[in-house]
Image: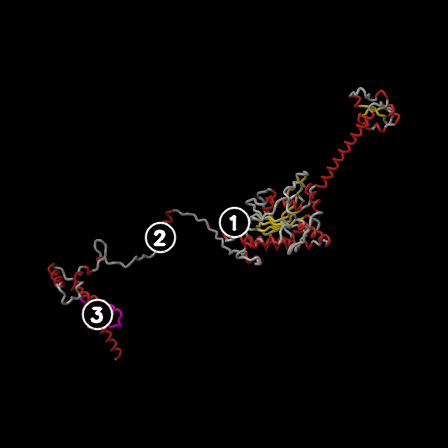
Amino acid sequence: RLHPLLLPAPSTGSTRCRRFSLSPCVCGEMAPIEANKTRRRATHLPASAQSKCPSGGEAERRQTAAEEDEEENNLWSSILSEVSTRSRSKLPSGKAVLVTGEDGSGKTTLIAKLQGVEDYKKGRGIEFLYLDVHDEDIDDHTRCNVWILDGDTYHKGLLKFAVTSDNIKDTLLMLVVDMSRPWMVMDSLQKWANVVQEHIDKLKIPPEEMREMEQSLVKEFQEYEEPDKEVPNSPQRRNTVLQETDEESVVLPLGANTLTHNLGIPVLVVCTKCDAIHQLEKEHDYRDEHFDFIQSHIRRFCLQYGAALIYTSIKENKNIDLMYKYLVHKLYGFPFHSPVLVVEKDAVFIPAGWDNEKKIGILHENFQSLKADDKFEDGIMKPPVRKVVHEKEILSEDDQVFLMKQQSFLAKQPPLSTGRPLDSATRVAGGSPRTPSRTGSASVVNVTPIPAGNKKIDPSIKGAASEGVLANFFNSLLSKKTGSPGGSGSNLQGSAKKSGHKPVLTDVQAELDRIARKPEAMSAAHTSITEDKAS
């Protein structure tokens, strides 16, 4: 029984009485307890004890206890609800990205850029990295595993460590190609897609599970919708919207050449080094139709594998953040509201499910010299290989040493003749050449040719014939003209005699006569020799 003197007095309302009271313990003694606990347990007291309590504040105490119990229950309900929500929306672990591509295509540099690492050293075989994924709405983060396979197909056996039958459902395939070498794009895509297909076949996944993965990929492709920019960036809101629209969405059938090669896992084709497009235009004379031709073939490949396509550039930091958002969207279900980009030729982005053959056909309208049905290797050919000449560093030598070498080199060279040397006697003081017959030019005008019919030269002797012709020519110039008016020739000879000088014409005439007689003597000698041989 409760002692009536120690019960709280409702009229006084003192703090002490509100804080403590007595309750019967097991041993029968009275023990102080908090007043609120007394009020909560007041309904459980025996009727005799309750009848002895004052009746004035009984209703108030019961109402207050009921309200406190309700608040306490609501508090625990909210805590349990929050914990349950966090456990359901917690980011899953074990997601992975498999990166394949040729050597030098920029695979490691691309992932290092997503990590925020500037200088990263490339490894060999297969590399393992990770990406930090953080969800601000639920304040949770996780790590996404990234496996980078070497560009040599010799290391394809290492895929068994990256992709297994247990984690293939949580894996995304990234095919990386180099746009600075566009003639290798299609061969690289086909080669690495075949390598991954062979590895998946070796995993021996049950047919039911594999069929379920393929159907899931087809469903995502068919249910693609244009992103709504008004939807807030919240995973909870996104899930609600999806649940509401799943029942109302209309699934369209797949088009021609769509998902004909279904790997069962999402695929993303990444074209790196797109800043080299401007260099291709300058050095290899690429035009817009060539880039449209390349894009059309890549998009057809993406249709066959249900893949997305994105053009990136590390140097210009183009579409790097967009690629990260799309990755976490496909792996973790993050909301994604970026539109399709097909206007700029070096910043293309096409998500999986948006493209079809009709949209690709728009690119064919710009073709002039190319055709849509042309093979890729016929339209995009590898340029001729230019031999790289490594120029050696040339050290300049001392000037005096160089001049001495040139002097010794010139000394060994034979003297060069700049022309036919002229006789110094035939030059005047001014340096201009003069002919010996210059003084007799006045008499040359009046001379007449002398018939040379009596002086015949044997044509069999070439040297004698040429000298004879010259002699006859000069004889005709130096001979006196008979019956010329004024007697200029006689006057010239008289003036020469008076001046005491030897006539020049006489000496020239004598020399010409000697030359003319020489062929006759040689002809006579030739005739005698011929007669002796005949006898």
Disc 1: which residue: 278
How many C-alpha atoms fall within 10 Å of the one at disc 3: few (<14), some, or many (≥20)?
A: some
Name the amino acid type tagged 3: Lys
SS state under label 3: helix
**Which of the 4 quarters of the picture holds residue 19?**
top right
Per the rendering, the mark at residue 319 is none
Q: Which region is colored magenta? A: 448-469
Please say if 20 is above or below 411: above
Can you tell which quarter of the image residue 190 is in?
A: bottom right
Which x, y percent locates residue 111? 61, 45
Q: Nearer the viewer, mark 3 or mark 2?
A: 3
Q: Residue placed at 40% from the left, 47% from the top?
A: 397
Q: Amino acid at mark 1?
A: His
Magenta-drawn stretch contains 450: yes
Task: Tell me if label 3 and label 1 are in contact, CB under 8 Å.
Answer: no
Camera-side residue: 82 or 248? 248
Residue identified by numbered label 3? 518
> Mark 2 or mark 1, which has the lower sequence index?
1
Q: Main secondary structure of the magenta part?
A: loop
Kindly report the distance in space between the C-alpha atoms of the residues bearing marks 2 and 1.
Answer: 53 Å
Q: Nearer the viewer, residue 8 or 436?
A: 8
On-image quarter of the C terminus? bottom left
Q: Is residue 21 visible?
A: yes
Q: Is residue 144 left or right of residue 481?
A: right
- Going by the numbered disc 2, the residue's amino acid type is Ser
> Around disc 2, counting alpha carbons within 10 Å, would you say few (fewer than 14), some (14 to 19), or many (20 or more)?
few
Q: Position of residue 331 (x, y in %)?
A: 67, 46
Q: Which residue is mark 2?
A: 408
Q: Mark 3 or mark 2: name the one nearer the start of the chain.
A: 2
Mark 1 residue element: helix
Q: What is the residue that sits farthest to the left in this orientation?
A: 498
Image quadrant occupied by the N terminus? top right
